Image (cartoon, rainbow, N blue to C red):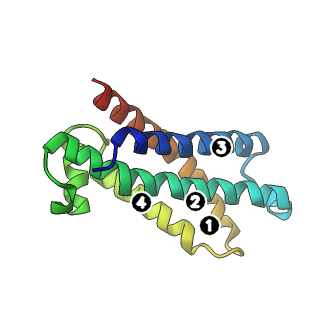
Amino acid sequence: MKDIKLVLMEVKGHLEYVIYDIGKILEKGLNKKFLEEKDYIILLDAFIFRFIKLQSSVSEKLFPLVYEYLTGKEYTEATFIDILNTLEKYKVIPSAEEWKEIRKLRNEFVHIYPWETELKLKAVELAIEKVKTIEKVIEKVEELINA
């Protein structure tokens, strides 16, 4: 089994960069007119990349280990939905449905074309909101394993 504390450190590293990028985005504002500026596009792309890494690391690395920690069962014996439902039951995540939405948002980023500027900005705006949820989940996991 991977060390849950090492995975938590990785996840917190991604979160730190995501929060940094959010600060830079909010300084400038989420506006279609800035999509003409290369630096702004690079900033949004960096945020999107790091959001994808953050969500993937939490879902694919951290959650299975938390499931094992809580249940004493191998995560390979459970489906992802089972893992989410267990984490919801133990109040690690607010709801399995909300986490599925966050995962769906991550997948949307992969399929947004460069010319879909409105869609990209709306997805970034939603992702910025969801980072607060992800941050609370990470804090909850940290409290759980340090108890």
Q: Residue at x 65, y 43 (%)?
A: 22
Q: Looking at the picture, how far across and down is residue 139, in whole percent?
A: 40, 32
Q: Looking at the picture, how far across and down is residue 134, in whole percent?
A: 44, 43
Q: Earlier in the sequence, mark 2 or mark 3?
A: 3
Cα gap from disc 2 to disc 1, whole angstroms: 6 Å
Cα gap from disc 1 to disc 3, whole angstroms: 18 Å
Q: Residue at x 21, y 51 (%)?
A: 85
In the image, residue 142 above or below residue 10: above
Q: Looking at the picture, how far across and down is residue 100, in whole percent?
A: 35, 58
The residue at which mark 4 appears reads as 103
Classify mark 4: residues with Cα within 10 Å, few (<14), some (14-19) or many (20+): some
Disc 4, disc 2: CB below 8 Å?
no
Disc 2, disc 1: CB below 8 Å?
yes
Q: Is residue 106 left or right of residue 141?
A: right
Cα gap from disc 4 to disc 3, whole angstroms: 19 Å
The residue at which mark 2 appears reads as 123
Q: Earlier in the sequence, mark 1 or mark 3?
A: 3
Q: Earlier in the sequence, mark 4 or mark 2?
A: 4
Cα gap from disc 2 to disc 3, whole angstroms: 13 Å
Looking at the rendered structure, the kind of residue marked 3 is Ile
Q: Residue 109 sits in which quadrant?
A: bottom right
Looking at the rendered structure, the kind of residue marked 2 is Ala
Q: Residue 123 sits in which quadrant?
A: bottom right
In the image, residue 57 above or below residue 22: below
Q: Earlier in the sequence, mark 4 or mark 3?
A: 3
Quadrant placement of the C terminus: top left
Classify mark 1: residues with Cα within 10 Å, few (<14), some (14-19) or many (20+): some
Q: Please, what secondary structure does the residue beneath circle 1 have?
A: helix
Q: Residue at x 70, y 74 (%)?
A: 114
In the image, residue 97 above or below residue 69: below
